[in-house]
Amino acid sequence: MTVKQVTKGRSTDHPVLRSVDIAVAIAVSDTGIGIPPEKQKLIFEAFQQADAGTSRKYGGTGLGLAISRELATLLGGEIKLVSSPGQGSTFTLYVPLAYAGSGRATPAPAGVISPVLVATQTEERVLDDRDDIHEDDNILLIVDDDPHYARVLLGLARDKGFKGIVASRGQMALSLARQYRPAAITLDVFLPDMLGWTVLNNLKLDPATRHIPVQMLSIEEERQHGLSHGAFSYLVKPATTEDLEHAFDRLKNYVAPHKKRLLIVEDNDIERQSIVELVSYDDLEVEAVATGSEALAALSDRRFDCCVLDLRLPDMTGFDLLETMQSASLGDLPVVVFTGKELTEEEDSRLRRVAKSVVLKDVQSPERLFDETALFLHRVVGELPPAKRQMLDRLHGSNEVLRNRKVLVVDDDVRNIFALTSLLENQDMEVLTATNGRQAIQIVENTPDLSVLLMDIMMPEMDGYETIREIRKNLQMRTLPILALTAKAMKGDREKCLQAGASDYIAKPVNTDQLLSLLRVWLYR
């Protein structure tokens, strides 16, 4: 590494460096594999590498240079690369000797070394209604990093009688949701600091915000994933004004005070009555029927907010009923399947395409069933009776379910393994580790009492997708919860994880509270 003052070498068109006489050049060289010219710009993009495959030979996330470039920009400088394949690379950071921020460079007096001041990154703020909020106002929290689109949504919100608050980042959205307790939320999937899915999961795992209906907005068609994780509705960008107005009308009608309606379809009289007793309270209107035809008659006559369905019915299968509901424009109705039927792999795949959630009957299933229906009905946890609140607290708030459970952490970065191991061992979990896919497969095959697997996707030689597919070939591991951990949060990657056989997906850097919450949920299943 070399550090020196320079008067040339940096870009002549750089907005800061072009106006200073002297800059500092910090150069780092290696004798590695080098980078071909056509890849030299690509590697500075987030989640990109010269060897970009998920089963590449070399490790890493592809985030380091993207972060370094942003830091260089904040310092008023830039990074340049000189590289030859097979000979190595030299990365040079150029920064002004003195930088006052805000795009303004200040020459330093001769012989005086001034400290470098880091510029604060500013974002265009949308003037919303947060300073004009009153007690009885219906608040809509708009989460979108595009200020133009946020203003469009804010105007529509005001037209529909909402007071609008705008957040451009996920963490800001979570903070504002807890502070203002909005009546509803519109949420974009791609945000600067985290995925909208992470925001949605955090909202739905917090009893204080779980009931808030969330309208997802995204350029991606991930509707089923959003609805299954508790989103109220899903709209694909770019949406027409008519689509947006319809979505806002649905939100407005939903947040108006009314009793939610739940339909229970179960042919066993004792089971049906036990479900009614489990879910009933003053905030809910419950209707219970014994056959598929009775269910279709009820659904055609009045609106329901959620449905609990057993697959074994006397007049038709639950599969037939679900598909009839789909063709009858009832595909948006959340259906929680509550069944003791042993599902084949084909039935399980067929079921998950149409049902928002699958709850298998076992000794802990009443808590899971109540939790799923409360999620899709957007029930306010704080307004439920103590016994029912305690049921949700046991499911989401206690880490007892994690105690003495075996978890396998698969990651090629020992720092990630160390961090996750420390976190999980503090919950009294027994942690096994693997640094590559083949080692992970061997441990899974030799550990029949394994409870859950945390799988990194971007690994050398054998990537996480291939590893998950190999594990799923073992029929005994078909129901093993596999949570994919990856920094590669690009378009289509979530679908690839789920198609490979992952149970859920968490973007890196992992939020520890979210990870523990997801582990609790999956270990109850």
Image (cartoon, rainbow, N blue to C red):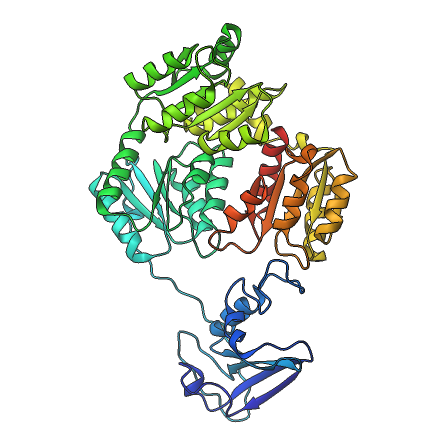
Residue lying at the far right of the rendered structure: 446
Q: Nearer the viewer, residue 259 or 106?
A: 259
Q: Please, is residue 387 above or below residue 125 in the view?
A: above
User: Could you tell me residue 447's position as x and y percent?
Assistant: 77, 37
Quadrant placement of the N terminus: bottom right
Question: Quick check: can you spot residue 345?
Answer: yes
- The residue shown at (70%, 32%) is 476
Q: Which quarter of the figure has residue 100?
A: bottom left
Horizontally, is 382 left or right of 252 in the view? right
Residue lying at the far top of the rendered structure: 269
Q: Nearer the viewer, residue 297 or 307?
A: 297
Q: Please, is residue 29 above or below residue 138 in the view?
A: below
- The residue shown at (56%, 27%) is 393
Horizontally, is 425 left or right of 180 in the view? right
User: Could you tell me residue 418's position as x and y percent?
Assistant: 72, 52
Q: Nearer the viewer, residue 301 or 137?
A: 301
User: Could you tell me residue 483's position as x and y percent?
Assistant: 61, 42
Quadrant placement of the C terminus: top right
The mark total stands at 0
Q: Please, is residue 179 above or below residue 125 in the view?
A: above
User: Could you tell me residue 260's position as x and y percent?
Assistant: 36, 22
Question: Quick check: can you spot residue 136?
Answer: no
Horizontally, is 280 left or right of 160 in the view? right
